[in-house]
């Protein structure tokens, strides 16, 4: 792991900024890597010298103010956009098309298609790959049962609650069968109660189906709960202000974890970095 | 933690469906009455006033025949005058409308796919609407003769534009976020078109069709005015100078009914083909 042992607050951030890893020096376990990435939209300087490393099957959280280029960073990783400066690679591939082939994006709004049944929404990527609808359904059906969606298969998206729609959107992303999941504020549109339930659900879903995850959120608690590492980004131009290694005992309920002193300390540190 | 999470939301959905049931079999008539009841009342009221005015005898019945006179004219002369005329006009209207639908959808898809064609043709398409199409009818009659051909062309020209423009707008207004997501889910350009753009454009396509359906009889009648020997337009053309005003009114009534039926047929096909267009949306 590239960042092992470096977890002492702003010092870490200082070190990371002073000594970016050698370009091209990608360790075997590194899945996503970004070096000195900058991006402008016209005169808007959106990202400035961002360095990232995410190892295989680890989860990186990106928190920051809105307009801080978090979603842009996701697009860059996913091959939907190219950096103006610097380099992004996914599983060693730098070409946009190759990155695109390795990443699946879950947008903030669920974007379920009202003309497809719930089960066919989840199986969209399978059908896109040329699998027949019947076979796709056969593949998706057990997933619905495993992920608390049993009975919703033949519903239209309009009949489902926000939480269920978000689960289907996540399944759809998962079923693209790609190594990297890019989650852009996946629960941003949910109320806080549903949100807490969905965080538990996502965490167990990812334990069952391990992937490399980049999660963009404005919710520090969500990032700390779901991720192994959290980077805090500044407002425009987006720079990385702090990198926080998260190693919390994941035992106990949502409320118990959030109340632990270690958790509170990490949250305070992240919020402090956000304010600077 | 295990992945088998039970969700109260599943339960909520099932109970919501249960709650829908007790509306019972009078639900549809009740909804119909709520939606159209007042408009029907206004129509009946206007017809009543009209009937009263005509009955007082202050207005000559060759100027304004009473509604009941129009109805009895229709009833008495149906077999003699109206049956074949209605059938002829219906064919012109319906086939012309189908041609317009196919052409409108085709052109919209072509212009959506090719930016070059869009730049070349879209402005011309808009400009073409400044030509009063119905006055082209006499020219078409000269070129194509007295058969059904020129009528189909006029109907198709009148109906084509709203369908093409609405469909094109629908195709182009697809949320960019869908397209980005689709790219990361193994979606090609063609699959994005088939699975995202085309279905999301369906509601606009059908609104275009509905607008056009209301124009279609106008096109057919103007086609007949410019040269024909049958059809409701021909009946009106013959009856007018002979002061058979009741006959003109009867033809207008038949045209109105045909127009309404065509609009209803479009709405019905929309329910079959794009049922999502009228579904309530939540949590978006």
Image: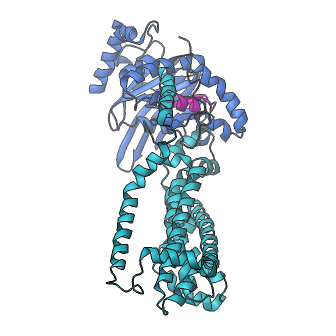
Chain colours: A blue, B cyan
**Residue B108 in the image, given as x and y percentages of width and height:** 57, 63
Q: Is residue A142 left or right of residue A45?
A: right
**Residue B71 in the image, given as x and y percentages of width and height:** 50, 74
Residue shown at 72%/37% (left/top)? A131
Span highlighted in magenta in the image: A167-182
Q: Say how many tags the image has.
A: 0
Of B23 and A1, nearer the camera is B23
Q: Is residue A7 left or right of residue A25?
A: left
Q: Is residue A243 left or right of residue A120?
A: left
Residue shown at 57%/83% (left/top)? B223
Of B128 and B237, nearer the camera is B237
Q: Magenta stretch: residue A164 in it? A: no
Q: Is residue A130 above or below residue B138?
A: above
Q: Is residue A44 above or below residue A185?
A: below
Q: Is residue B48 above or below residue A22?
A: below
Residue B227 in view in this figure: yes
Residue B124 in view in this figure: no
Of B16 and A203, nearer the camera is B16
**Residue A146 in the image, given as x and y percentages of width and height:** 60, 19
């Amino acid at each position: 792991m590239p960042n092992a042992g470096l977890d002492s607050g702003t010092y870490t951030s200082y070190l990371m900024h002073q000594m970016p890893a050698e370009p091209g020096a990608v360790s075997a376990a590194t899945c996503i890597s970004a070096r000195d990435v900058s991006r402008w939209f016209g005169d808007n300087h959106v990202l400035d010298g961002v360095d990232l490393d995410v190892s295989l099957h680890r989860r990186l959280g990106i928190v920051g103010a809105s307009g801080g280029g978090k979603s842009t960073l996701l697009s860059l990783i996913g091959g939907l956009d190219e950096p103006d400066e610097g380099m992004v690679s996914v599983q060693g591939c730098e070409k946009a098309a190759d990155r695109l082939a390795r990443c699946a994006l879950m947008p903030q709004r669920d974007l379920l298609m009202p003309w497809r049944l719930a089960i066919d929404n989840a199986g969209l990527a399978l059908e896109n790959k040329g699998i027949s609808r019947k076979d796709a359904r056969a593949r998706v059906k057990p997933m619905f049962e495993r992920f608390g969606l049993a009975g919703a298969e033949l519903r239209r998206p309009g009949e489902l609650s926000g939480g269920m729609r978000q689960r289907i959107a996540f399944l759809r992303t998962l079923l693209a069968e790609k190594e990297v999941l890019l989650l852009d504020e996946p629960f941003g549109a949910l109320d806080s109660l549903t949100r807490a339930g969905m965080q538990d659900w996502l965490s167990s879903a990812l334990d069952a189906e391990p992937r490399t995850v980049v999660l963009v959120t404005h919710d520090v608690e969500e990032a700390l709960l779901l991720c192994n590492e959290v980077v805090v980004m500044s407002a425009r131009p987006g720079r990385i202000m702090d990198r926080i290694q998260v190693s919390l005992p994941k035992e106990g309920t949502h409320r118990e974890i959030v109340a632990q002193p270690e958790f509170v300390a990490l949250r305070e540190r992240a919020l402090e970095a956000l304010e600077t | 933690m295990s992945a088998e999470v039970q969700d109260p939301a599943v339960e909520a959905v099932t109970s919501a469906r249960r709650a829908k049931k007790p509306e019972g079999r009078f639900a549809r008539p009740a909804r119909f009455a709520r939606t159209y009841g007042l408009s029907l009342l206004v129509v009946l009221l206007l017809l009543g006033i009209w009937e009263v005015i005509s009955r007082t005898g202050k207005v000559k019945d060759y100027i304004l025949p009473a509604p009941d006179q129009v109805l009895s004219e229709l009833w008495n002369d149906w077999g003699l005058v109206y049956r074949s005329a209605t059938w002829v006009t219906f064919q012109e209207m319906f086939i012309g409308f189908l041609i317009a639908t196919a052409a409108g959808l085709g052109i919209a898809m072509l212009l959506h796919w090719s930016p070059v064609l869009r730049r070349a043709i879209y402005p011309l398409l808009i400009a073409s609407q400044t030509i009063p199409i119905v006055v082209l009818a006499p020219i078409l009659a000269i070129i194509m003769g007295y058969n059904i051909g020129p009528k189909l062309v006029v109907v198709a020209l009148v109906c084509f534009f709203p369908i093409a423009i609405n469909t094109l707008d629908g195709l182009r207004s697809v949320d960019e976020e869908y397209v980005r997501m689709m790219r990361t889910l193994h979606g090609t350009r063609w699959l994005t078109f088939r699975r995202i753009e085309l279905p999301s454009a369906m509601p606009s396509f059908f609104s275009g069709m509905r607008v056009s359906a209301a124009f279609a009889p106008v096109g057919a009648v103007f086609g007949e005015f410019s040269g024909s020997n049958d059809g409701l337009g021909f009946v009106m053309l013959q009856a007018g100078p002979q002061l058979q005003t009741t006959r003109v009114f009867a033809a207008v009534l038949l045209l109105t009914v045909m127009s309404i039926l065509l609009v209803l047929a479009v709405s019905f096909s929309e329910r079959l083909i794009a049922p999502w267009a009228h579904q309530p949306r939540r949590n978006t």
